[in-house]
């Protein structure tokens, strides 16, 4: 397994996928090679983990490489430390998420974001769910929270969602 320079390899993969997408390669299944897929699997990632972020970056200008890399780093650490390099057999369906309009403690989007973040950590998001999508990015900007920072908080309190809510409330007050 690649450890020391895996971010360099991931960045090359990202840049190649961005270039490919701009040239018309807009299929999740062909955005990475089989060799690259093996590399991603060893990080606890898959082709959608690249495709969604590349697509949004090309079409919307964000999230940028550094945000993508920070999110992948948290997922990789969770995969190695909590999951011992084993993937989950659970898949969260988009219909399992709370509605986009739900609020908790007056905070819109947070009820939806918490299970998305935990699902991202565990590698359980189905291909139609993206952690750090446009709605998530709006939430993060509104509350001045980096997406990777939120993932780390979700990891710390993954079994106590009310602590995640309390953390966001404190952040709003800063």
Image (spheres, grey):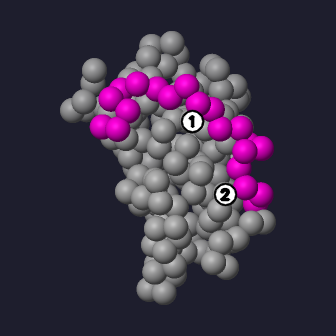
Mark number, residue 58? none
Q: Is residue 13 visible?
A: no
> Given contact means CB atoms under 8 Å apart, are the residues at marks 1 and 2 in contact?
no
The residue tagged 2 is: 112
Q: In this view, does 75 lie above or below 88?
A: below
User: Can you give x and y, in whole percent of width and height, for residue 113 in the image?
Assistant: 61, 57
User: For residue 152, what is the image quadrant?
Assistant: bottom left
User: Can you give x and y, in whole percent of width and height, for residue 102 in the image?
Assistant: 74, 66
User: Can you give x and y, in whole percent of width and height, for residue 34 in the image?
Assistant: 51, 12
Looking at the image, residue 72 sits to the left or right of residue 117; the answer is left
How much space separates mark 1 and mark 2, taking CA atoms?
Answer: 15 Å
Frontmost residue, 52 versus 75: 75
How many callouts does the rendering have? Answer: 2
Frontmost residue, 166 versus 94: 166
User: Can you give x and y, in whole percent of width and height, for residue 148 in the image?
Assistant: 44, 55
**Residue 172 colored in magenta in the image:** no
Residue stretch rendered in magenta on the structure: 81-100
> What residue is shown at x 66% (from left), y 57% (from top)?
112
Q: Circle 1 sits in a helix, a strand or a loop, which is it?
A: loop
For marks 1 and 2, the one nearer the N-term is 2
The residue tagged 1 is: 124
> What residue is shown at x 70% (from left), y 71% (from top)?
103
Looking at the image, residue 76 sits to the left or right of residue 16; the answer is left
Q: Is residue 152 above or below residue 138?
A: above
> What residue is shown at x 72% (from left), y 45% (from top)?
96
Frontmost residue, 140 versus 85: 85
């Amino acid at each position: 397994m690649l450890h020391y320079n895996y971010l360099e390899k991931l960045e090359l993969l990202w840049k190649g996928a961005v270039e490919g997408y701009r040239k018309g390669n807009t299929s999740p299944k062909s955005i990475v090679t089989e060799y690259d897929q093996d590399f991603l699997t060893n990080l606890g990632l898959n082709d959608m983990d690249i495709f969604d972020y590349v697509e949004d970056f090309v079409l919307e200008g964000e999230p940028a490489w550094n945000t993508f890399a920070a999110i992948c780093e948290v997922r990789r650490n969770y995969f190695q430390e909590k999951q011992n390099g084993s993937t989950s057999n659970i898949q969260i369906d988009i219909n399992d998420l709370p509605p986009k309009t739900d609020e908790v403690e007056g905070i819109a989007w947070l009820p939806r974001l918490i299970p998305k973040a935990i699902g991202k950590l565990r590698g359980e998001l189905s291909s139609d769910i993206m952690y750090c999508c446009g709605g998530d990015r709006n939430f993060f900007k509104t509350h001045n929270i980096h997406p990777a920072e939120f993932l780390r908080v979700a990891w710390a309190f993954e079994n106590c969602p009310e602590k995640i809510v309390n953390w966001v409330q404190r952040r709003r007050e800063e």
